Image: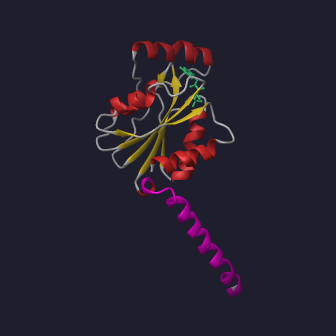
Amino acid sequence: MKKLLLFILPILLICAGCTFANNTKQGDIMDKKILIAYFSWGGNTKSIAEKIQIKTGGDMFRIETATPYPEDYNEAAYGVAKKQHEEGTKPALKDNGDVSNYDIIFVGTPAWWYEMAPAVKTFLSENNFEGKTIVPFITHGGGGKYTIAEDMGKMAKGSKVLSPLVVYERGNSETDKEIDNWLKQIK
Ligand SMILES: Cc1cc2nc3c(=O)[nH]c(=O)nc-3n(C[C@H](O)[C@H](O)[C@H](O)COP(=O)(O)O)c2cc1C
């Protein structure tokens, strides 16, 4: 038993050291309190949020509307979401979230009708971002980032907005590397 402990203990210590090094290697922002808040209807933005979570160790918050969007693509996209886009609706959320305990808030959204998803507008409007840093990440179907990052800054008064990560749909085999480079850049 004693021999087994002597064998296992150094391995455990080395693993703990590696985890610490991995979590801190990205630099300054990793020392801050991080929240990853995201809206995702089809799962693409969620999968990017999960990658960011693994790399930063931040807390996760899924932004969800009080009334869920229809599961049918046409109904969701060309019905509810298009109308909300045209009317500038900020739909009620299941939970507005609370950013008060965080310094850095990664905010993820799919591009919906050339802008951030309406639920993300609600999240930004219903929280106080004074003195906070917003790090946008955007997934899209070919249209790119539009002015989503700039719009986030306008909605989240008093915040500083860093350069966004922009991913086509769910990304590809290069996405992990791109996220690593982006995190290094923004630190
Ligand atoms: C309602 C709706 C509107 C969309 N509008 C755009 C758009 O304006 N530009 C674009 O490039 N992609 C658009 N897309 C595609 C999504 O941005 C893309 O598939 C995104 O990765 C979906 O993220 P999600 O799976 O997390 O919901 C739209 C999709 C939906 C459902």
Residue 52 spot, x, y in % from top left: 54, 46
Please name the residue shown 42% across and 23% down the image: 91
Q: Is residue 91 magenta?
A: no
State whether residue 93 appears in this view: no
Q: Is residue 57 left or right of residue 87?
A: right
The image quadrant that residue 124 belongs to is top left
Magenta span: chief secondary structure: helix
Please name the residue shown 49% across and 60% down the image: 24
Q: Nearer the viewer, residue 130 or 128?
A: 130
Task: Point out the image quarter for the N terminus.
Answer: bottom right
Q: Nearer the viewer, residue 75 or 82?
A: 82
Residue 54 spot, x, y in % from top left: 57, 51
Tell me if residue 14 comes above or below residue 150 in the rendering.
below
Please name the residue shown 47% across and 34% down the image: 63
Q: Nearer the viewer, residue 169 or 177?
A: 177
Q: Is residue 20 magenta?
A: yes
Residue 123 spot, x, y in % from top left: 39, 32
Q: Which residues are magenta?
A: 2-29
